[in-house]
Image (cartoon, helix red, strand yellow):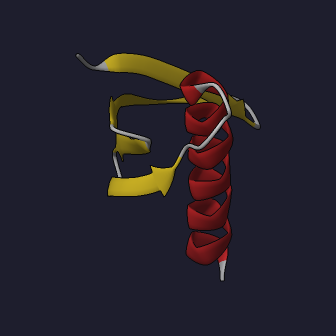
Amino acid sequence: MWESVQVAVGPRTHRGRYRLEGRRLVLEWRGGRIVEWCGMLRPEVVAESKLKQLVSSAAYAGAA
């Protein structure tokens, strides 16, 4: 089952969705899909952190 996640970066809010496959977290967002190791952390924490990192790096890459 997919869960939704959203983060605010600057004045914009970015949304994605995630689910667990074993101990791996699958995150989909407007930039694509990634798989991240979740381990002992709560999946929503990993999803928020990774989405914020992806959005920030995409914004930086777009500005360069």
19 vs 53: above or below: above
State the residue at coordinates (62%, 37%). 46
57 above or below 16? below
Residue sitting at the far left: 1
Q: Position of residue 48 (x, y in %)?
A: 62, 33
- Looking at the image, residue 5 sits to the left or right of residue 55; the answer is left
26 and 4: which is toward the camera: 26
Question: Which residue reaches farthest right?
Answer: 10
- Pick the front one: 48 or 12: 48
Res 26 quadrant in image: top left
Q: Quadrant of the C terminus?
A: bottom right
The percent coordinates of residue 4 (x first, y second) are: 41, 18
Residue in the image at 58% along x and 23% along y: 44
Residue 22 image offset from top left, x and y in percent: 34, 38
- Residue 3 pos. (x, y %): 37, 16
Quarter of the view holding residue 32: bottom left
